[in-house]
Image (tube, helix red, strand yellow):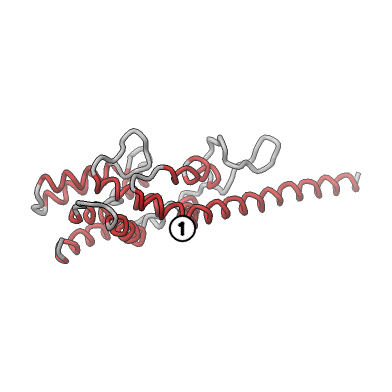
């Protein structure tokens, strides 16, 4: 891929990015992660990989406007149409489309090509470790989801088995489990290096908010008892 082609794809990506948790810097990190992983794999088609990395989240705006849409599905079609309109070969456009369509964290549509697997891992790395926790907090704040939910007894839920969206629920449902979902050895290695930071952050945050509720409720009851 030459610089002119890269700039064409980059400029189209930049015109589509509006989500603060999935901004242009996320795209660059995914690209750089992908290139790092690709160094450890054989026969990587860098033209496909770079194009897919640059365009993998261009459907985010549509999903934000209509949560019923899947940004991977929307983005894969947008990428395919853009590439065809700019005279890329149909085979190339189709391969990039496949990478984008399968990059999302879902079990029913796994990546098949090597480039798709690298994109999947590179994207998931950005949801791992301290960075993944920070990005999730930014995203949850943008859509007005809370940090946590309360149990029937008024205590803080860990997020386990929660159906109400929250940061803790997202951690238990997705972030905690991503470390065994990588397709490449390098991607898994990089993720494992980040895992403990995410575990520590979640545990510390859960302990802090839980202590506030438990201690505060106890003190409130003592205060009521002393008044009565």
Rendered position, 81 above or below 35? above
Q: Residue at x 31, y 45 (%)?
A: 103
Residue projecting furthest to the bottom:
3
In front here: 63 or 1? 1
- For numbered disc 1, what is the local secondary structure? helix
Q: Is residue 70 left or right of residue 213?
A: left
Q: Is residue 97 left or right of residue 204?
A: left
Q: Residue at x 25, y 46 (%)?
A: 114
In front here: 102 or 63? 102
In front here: 193 or 178? 193
Q: Residue at x 30, y 50 (%)?
A: 119
In front here: 1 or 148? 1
The quadrant where residue 70 appears: top left
Q: Position of residue 204 (x, y in %)?
A: 62, 54
Q: Position of residue 55 (x, y in %)?
A: 25, 53
Q: Is residue 71 left or right of residue 210?
A: left
Q: Residue at x 37, y 47 (%)?
A: 64
Q: Position of residue 133 (x, y in %)?
A: 49, 54
Looking at the rendered structure, the number of numbered marks drawn on it comes to: 1
**Which quadrant of the figure contains the C terminus?**
top right
Rendered position, 141 above or below 25? above
- Which residue bears the numbered disc 1? 131
Badge 1: few (under 14), some or many (20 or more) residues near its Cα, within 10 Å? Answer: some
Q: Position of residue 9 (x, y in %)?
A: 20, 58
The quadrant where residue 16 appears: bottom left
**Which quadrant of the figure contains the N terminus?**
bottom left
């Amino acid at each position: 891929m030459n610089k002119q082609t890269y700039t064409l794809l980059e400029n189209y990506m930049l015109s589509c990015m509006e989500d603060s948790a999935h901004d242009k810097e996320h795209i660059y990190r995914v690209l750089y992660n992908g290139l790092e992983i690709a160094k450890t794999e054989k026969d990587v088609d860098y033209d496909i990989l770079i194009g897919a990395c640059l365009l993998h989240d261009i459907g985010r705006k549509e999903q934000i406007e209509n949560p019923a849409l899947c940004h991977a599905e929307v983005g894969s079609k947008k990428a395919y149409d853009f590439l065809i309109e700019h005279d890329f070969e149909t085979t190339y456009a189709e391969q990039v489309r496949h990478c984008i369509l399968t990059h999302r964290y879902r079990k029913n549509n796994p990546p098949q090509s090597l480039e798709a697997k690298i994109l999947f891992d590179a994207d998931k790395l950005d949801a791992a470790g301290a960075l993944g926790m920070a990005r999730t907090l930014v995203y949850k704040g943008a859509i007005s989801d809370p940090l946590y939910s309360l149990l029937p007894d008024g205590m803080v839920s860990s997020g386990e088995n929660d159906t109400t969206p929250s940061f803790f629920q997202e951690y238990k449902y997705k972030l905690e489990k991503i470390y065994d979902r990588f397709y490449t050895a390098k991607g898994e290695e990089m993720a494992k290096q980040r895992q403990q930071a995410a575990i520590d952050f979640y545990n510390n945050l859960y302990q802090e908010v839980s202590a506030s509720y438990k201690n505060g409720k106890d003190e409130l009851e003592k205060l009521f008892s002393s008044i009565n």
